[in-house]
Image: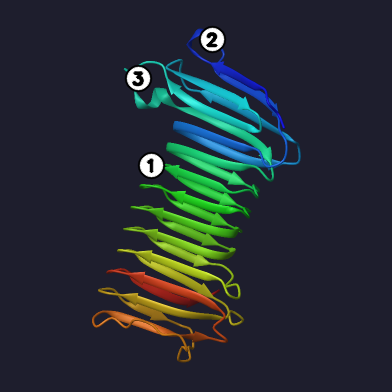
Amino acid sequence: MLLVSVSFLLGAASASADRLERHFKVEAHPVVTIHNPNGTIVVRAWTKSEVMVVATRATPQIEVFVEQTGNRVDILTHQVSGAAAPEDLRADYEISVPENAELEIHDDSGGVNVSNVLGDMNVETIAADVAVQDAAGYLTVKTVGGAFQCLRCAGRLEVSSISGSFRLIDLRSYSVRAQTSTGNILFNGAFLPNASYHLKNYSGVIEVRFSPGDSFDISATSLKGKVHNEASLTPSSHRHFIPRFGNALFGSFNAGRAKVELSSFDGTISILKRD
């Protein structure tokens, strides 16, 4: 276990050096945290037992602080002056980590993109969009207005937003919980046996795509919206709460091996055949 603490600072004293590159040797399952008020964060996995951080700041109004303590690397963008414009507080990061790294990312605005990281991830943003590809750990994402896309993800997924929309494409996740107030939700992935999928919004569109070989038990309810269905369902053996008002759909497709729950207040729910 690494016990040393090493820190580097890109600050006001080195105004000409607006790019920082540092390398940190780590053991298996390192933890990497990033706190950034504005800018893009790109994280990619590689085969080295090393974390590489490349940071570029917009102006000397901010400091970039990077520290290693044991098997943990912390990255922080810090405001130097209290009278800085929002565009002056931007820092962009390109970070390479081992595949089994665990990530904790906070980015208010800009964007977050993570590829091929298999460890657990927690991502929180305000307006920044989040895109994740080929992840396999426990992934939790919270945004206020940022959109979220998950491509070829596995493992467990929990995502929530106030106005962001979600695109869940080619998923092989055994547990999915996605909730947004005014955004749209698209699910176009595999329905794994004994897996559960819960998609919910207040308004907007919830669209689920299925193939002839899929197997799921589904409940879809919209209190004031419509429910469109292209799946040939048989009566479900599970008990479902049937609302007195609104539109509801219940049934099993093939053997009903996965559990799918779709709910909206006044949005449209569509269960459509995959192209």
Label count reads: 3
Where in the figure is residue 25, as x and y percent of width and height? 72, 29
Q: Residue at x 51, y 8 (%)?
A: 13
Q: CA distance from mark 2 to mark 1?
A: 30 Å
Nearest the camera: 154 or 194? 194
Q: Residue at x 44, y 43 (%)?
A: 124
Other residues around mark 1 within 10 Å, as few (<14) / some (14–19) / many (≥20)? some
User: Which residue carries the number 3 mark?
Assistant: 84
Q: Residue at x 66, y 33 (%)?
A: 71
What amino acid type is highlighted by mark number 1?
Ile
Where is 175 relative to 159, above or below?
Answer: below
User: Which residue carries the number 1 mark?
Assistant: 126
> First in sequence: mark 2 or mark 1?
2
Quadrant in which the C terminus appears: bottom right
Disc 1 secondary structure class: loop
Where in the figure is residue 270, as x and y percent of width and height? 41, 74
What amino acid type is highlighted by mark number 3?
Ala
Quadrant in which the N terminus appears: top right
**Extreme bottom residue here?**
235
Where is 98 relative to 227, above or below?
Answer: above
> First in sequence: mark 2 or mark 3?
2
Residue 14, numbered circle = 2
Q: CA distance from mark 1 to mark 3?
A: 19 Å
> First in sequence: mark 1 or mark 3?
3
Describe residue 248's horizontal placement relative to residue 173 as left or right.
Answer: left
Disc 3 secondary structure class: loop
Nearest the camera: 153 or 237? 237
